[in-house]
Image (cartoon, rainbow, N blue to C red):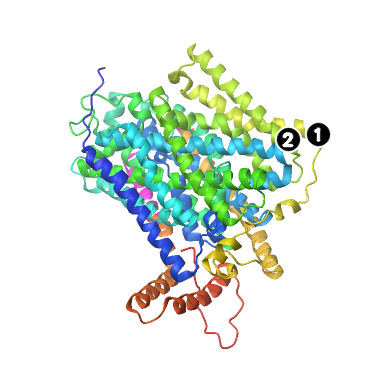
Amino acid sequence: MAETIVTPPLDQGVGYGIVLGLGFGFALGMILVTFILKRYNSELQTSEMFTTAGRTVKSGLVGSAVVSSWTWAATLLQSSGVCYRYGVSGPFWYASGATVQILLFATLAIELKRRAPNAHTFLEVIKARYGTVAHMVFMVFGLVTNILVSLMLVVGGSATVSALTGMHTIAAIYLLPVGVIAYTMVGGLKATILTDWIHTFILLIIIIIFSLTAYASSDRLGSPSAVYDLLVEAAFNHPVEGNAEGSYLTMRSKEGAIFFVINIVGNFGTVFLDNGYYNKAIAASPVHALPGYIIGGLSWFAIPWLTATTMGLSALALEDTPAFPTYPNRMSDADVSAGLVLPYAAVALLGKGGAVATLLIVFMAVTSATSSELIAVSSIFTYDLYRTYFKPDASGRRLIYMSHVIVVAYALFISSFSVGLYYAGISMGYLYLMMGCIISSAVIPATLTLVWKGQNKWAAALSPIFGLAFSLIAWLVTAHKECGSLDVECTGSNNPMLAGNVTALLSPLALIPIFTLIFGMDNYDWKSMMEIRRGDDHDLAATAGVDLEQTVGGHEETANEFADEQSKLMRASKISKWTTAGLTLAFLVLWPFPMYGSSYVFSKPFFTGWVTVGIIWIFCSLGAVGLFPVFEGRLTLVRTFKAIVLDLSGKKHVTAIRSENEGAAAIDGKAASGDETPPVANEPLKTETDEKAE
């Protein structure tokens, strides 16, 4: 079949306008927000604030930050691709196989805050427990994780921008991170979390528009019934090998199930080894870490599930119509792997408006997740490499400088690496399947570091290395046995990737007991993790002329506050284990496998209900991570707005405003920590308050 040359639906100017215009727009917005927070709320950009956002973020913003960080370009593009290949099972396998990691990570987030309350990265915890060798091993695995995720973001995003606008892929690769660098350098983790909320809100609105267009208002589709009929016709014309009855409307999909396993394994690595998720846990107020991750995980599920169920199925339904960009041909495997199912379906559904909407959501997904990766990598280099091995007495000013340097250097490195992958023909889909082979052997040792006192330092340090070796052997030997070659197409196929991914994740289950027998079981007392220290920001505070204790995140805990916090975290730890285990069982077993085992092919009413549940779920997600953070932060928002009005009108000097807000901040801090102590006499009764992180 001759490959169809697709004319981009938008001009190059639109691509440059969105990539550069929106990028700098967000950068200027964050510069303004940072100025406002400093002027009215005494938020000084210290090294602690840059890396941890003051450790005071509430559950709504934690949830939106988790959703935004976990919504990669692959979330939208790869999920639509697996839907196009395997039918309705693809979106569910993608969504459930990547939701459980966030839910299970909630338990690890609580353990991190309980065991190491002053940590900046999970690697500091490794160093504190095991020493230098294990620290170096996990630093390599952590950085490789960040590199793979960043490459997927840039490679997938640039391919989509190029397909929609004709903008040269190399230009897109270098320009996409520019705006992100600017606002990340100015605002640090706080700016990342705030822009995460904006990105998530816009993203959810566009997904809702897509779903309501396809299933309610489109002239070409317009109802679940119409989509169902076209999918039945598509299965008749080109049945899916390995699916029950060759149908796109069944959960019984052999290749889909293989992808499900690869997806689960790979995503354990990209959550449990990505310092960005530990950053969110560290930034959360102690009582808000667990609900934040639960809200984030459940809200995120609807994004790939409904996006792919809408756009992947729309592509299948419309690709035989003149509105589809590749008509009269079907999409090639290369197009699907490059993530072009969603943009082509959007163009078929909404014309140029669909192309612009796709460009926006891909831009949001790429930039918000990239900012998280920039902070994750800068904190590793700053705290785990520079402060640990080169300058232990580094001042806060020096740590901030190093963070800024790393942000710029890492962005340049990722863009240059992406250019190499582009010319080598490595797509986002290939990277997505491969990542588990490379990194997942470190997942179990990293997890046991926080939950089991018996793991010795050699089991922690050597298991990931041997696991990586075994996974590479399994991956490449299987590829050579299946195809007789080791080219990109063969090594990227499902069975070799399955062998490598599963070997990587599970090999430590055998290796750790072996190294425990050889070197003996540890009996760790958890004390060295407690001794991790915060950055010294007194020089920055002195230069700014403020008391560090009065800044957000600058307050040192008293013994009573610490004991109270530990009590709350212990209770949250018990709740999280039961909650996350139950939700994981529901997503991985109770929901999908009865339909898989029965080979059920959806009826039209069942398919209508399936789509309806997805649409309801996405509206709930909008409420949970779009509107709830505004509600949580309503008092801070009102107070800050009043301060701006008073300052601009000249009715009150900024010093007086800041003093009043500092008083309110003290009360807000108690609310953030869950302190239920009644107000003292002469102190006005307060309702539930928010904190400076909003």
Q: Is residue 266 in view from this perspective?
A: yes
Q: Residue at x 62, y 54 (%)?
A: 110
Q: Do labels 1 and 2 touch, CB within 8 Å?
A: yes
Q: Residue furthest top?
A: 484
- Up-down: is 135 above or below 479? below
Q: Is residue 106 magenta?
A: no
Crowding at label 2, few (<14), some or many (≥20) Cα neighbours within 10 Å? Answer: many
Q: Which of disc 2 and disc 1 is earlier in sequence?
A: 2
Q: Which residues are magenta?
A: 599-621
Residue wearing tag 1: 519
Measured in 3D between alpha carbons, the distance from the residue under mark 1 to the one under mark 2, in whole angstroms, is 8 Å
- Up-down: is 417 above or below 669? above
* Residue 322: quarter of image: top left
Q: Residue at x 24, y 48 (%)?
A: 216
The kind of residue tagged 2 is Ala
Residue 202 in the image, given as x and y percentages of width and height: 34, 53
What type of secondary structure mainly makes up the magenta span?
A: helix
Q: Is residue 616 in view from this perspective?
A: no
Q: Residue at x 61, y 39 (%)?
A: 139
The kind of residue tagged 1 is Phe
The mark found on residue 459 in the picture is 2
